[in-house]
Image: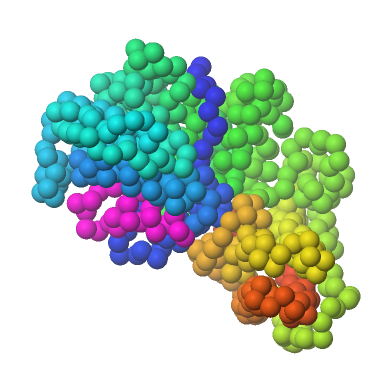
Amino acid sequence: MTDYGHELLFGGFLTPDARQPAQVVARARLCEQVGLDLVTFQDHPYQPGFLDTWTLMSYLAAATSRIRLAGNVLNLPLRQPVVLARSVASLDLLSGGRVELGLGTGAFWDAIEANGGRRLAPGQSVDALDEAIRIIREVWAADRRGGVRVDGEHYRVLGAKRGPAPAHPVGIWVGAYKPRLLRLVGRTADGWLPSLSYLPKGPAELADLNALVDEGASAAGRDPAEVRRLLNVSGRFTRAGAGFLDGPPQQWARELTDLVLTHGTSGFILGTDDPTSIQLFAQEVAPAVRELVAAERAGSTAPGSAGSSGPAGEGAPARSAEDASAGPGSVTSAGSGEGGSAAGSGRPAGAQPGEVVRAGGVAGLAVTPTPAPQVRHSDHRLWDESTRPVAPPAPPGHVYSPQAQAAGGHLVDVHDHLRRELSEIRDLLDQVRRGVVSAGDARGVLNRMTMRQNNWTLGAYCAAYCTLVTQHHGLEDDAIFPHLRRADPGLVPVIDRLAQEHVVIHDVVEGVDRALVALIEDPGRLTELQRAVDVLTDTLLSHLSYEEQNLVEPLARYGFYPGQL
């Protein structure tokens, strides 16, 4: 068994479809919002049906705030190494250190040659990659004296100026399958990035291929553990297991954990454009794998897996089967722990893991929606609360499982996060008034907050609570609201009203920002800021309470997406 000990990475591998550029951007934002570490794109510059990968990555670097970006993998024969090195370093600097370099030798030589590239034999393409990596590293070594000089057979760089250096140590991850190229990966690269679908024997081939990478590293005097092992994967999320990565999330978690502990794979990149699969992978599979691996590395048994035969064996998921399907960001407690409570575990006090909790309607839920505020800070009203539609009552005698309890409670958890941010805003106002914080600094804090960036969609609430990230149009449009509309037509008036209020709240938050700008220009306009914050307080707290009163119970029945419960 070989675990190289790297921090785990989970990413998405999206199709850069030129026919649907807005959808590509939305899917990339979704990857960030649901908590993935990385979003990647294939690079075929000769393919007019695809967006240019480097242009797309540059656009997304500005459209996202946290997620890393990489080609998977970039086509070296059509991307000159010096220019590529400077492009990577520049985008890494502009994005705050969020770019990695996936690199390949090229494969479709007819298309490469038709687009101005040179046709190379397999051995030549390996040599060309070796030269290119040397050039790229030399360009990035901006602190060295003298120009870059690599007088290679395929690339001749004779005195090019160095720099810029990237913002962080960019990983060069190479797609490779043949022995000579695998040894080169071990000798010169930072990571190995194959696709599981290209391995005829599946995961069983990883041991032999890893050995070649290790061999190359050792021959170059490197520790093989310096080379990160990543893997492009694909599969299906289904209720019953039917094969490798073809089953429920907890099965995926066991199987990927086995790849970490047995083969040292520390990065998993899911090839799919399906929003629900992206969400399941990020919010159910990834956390469970991290938990299992952390427990194994610590020499302990993962919570809820006592008596298991191993990290990938039956009965060894990080959470129980029901808990693992509790959904995005669901709060579960496999293993009691100190300080556990019904509110924190998503089930009523006294209920045991896996126990079905019977409830007669809403009253049977352990989750209590937050009541509407009794104190108002402003006389300004932006909507008539008496006209709000009400959700249909729950079916009498409905049975709520533990994961259903957790799904219902998740909305309250999300809202509590936003309430804390609101408290921060009011505290900021007090600090501005007392001169402790400038209006400019206060505006910077506001603009980093979830509520400023999520455009007020229910889907954004959920993703932002888990990852504190921005722009969640894709998830809302593709998953949660349409799902609830289909699940219960009686909820449509409530959802329509919530959508209208989201727009109003977005405008109110913008109003706070405008008041901060006005205060920067004229320090005497503190009253205007106070009024804007008071309106935000009343509007937000009223809205959150209304949403909980009407959606907590339906979410406990239908979940946040089809098949969750």
Side of 86 where 392 appears, left or right:
right
Magenta-drawn segment: 39-63
Give the x, y percent position of residue 446: 67, 64
**On screen, 356 above or below 201?**
below
Residue lying at the far front in this picture: please name it. 145
Q: How is the image coloured?
A: rainbow
Asked which quadrant contains residue 383, the reply is: bottom right
Give the x, y percent position of residue 335: 77, 35
Identify the residue shown where x is 37% and y is 33%: 141
Give the x, y percent position of residue 536: 73, 75
Nearest the camera: 116 or 399?
116
Identify the residue shown where x is 84% and y is 78%: 377
Count of all numbered marks drawn on residues in the image? 0
Identify the residue shown where x is 55% and y is 68%: 482
**On screen, 242 above or below 472?**
above
Side of 227 where 286 appears, left or right:
right
Q: Is residue 336 among what the camera can see?
A: yes
Q: Is residue 412 among what the camera can see?
A: no
Nearest the camera: 321 or 528?
528
Asked which quadrant contains residue 73, the reply is: top left
Identify the residue shown where x is 83% and y is 61%: 368
Give the x, y percent position of residue 355: 78, 44
Q: Give yes or no for residue 269 being in the magenta stretch.
A: no
Side of 55 where 493 appears, left or right:
right
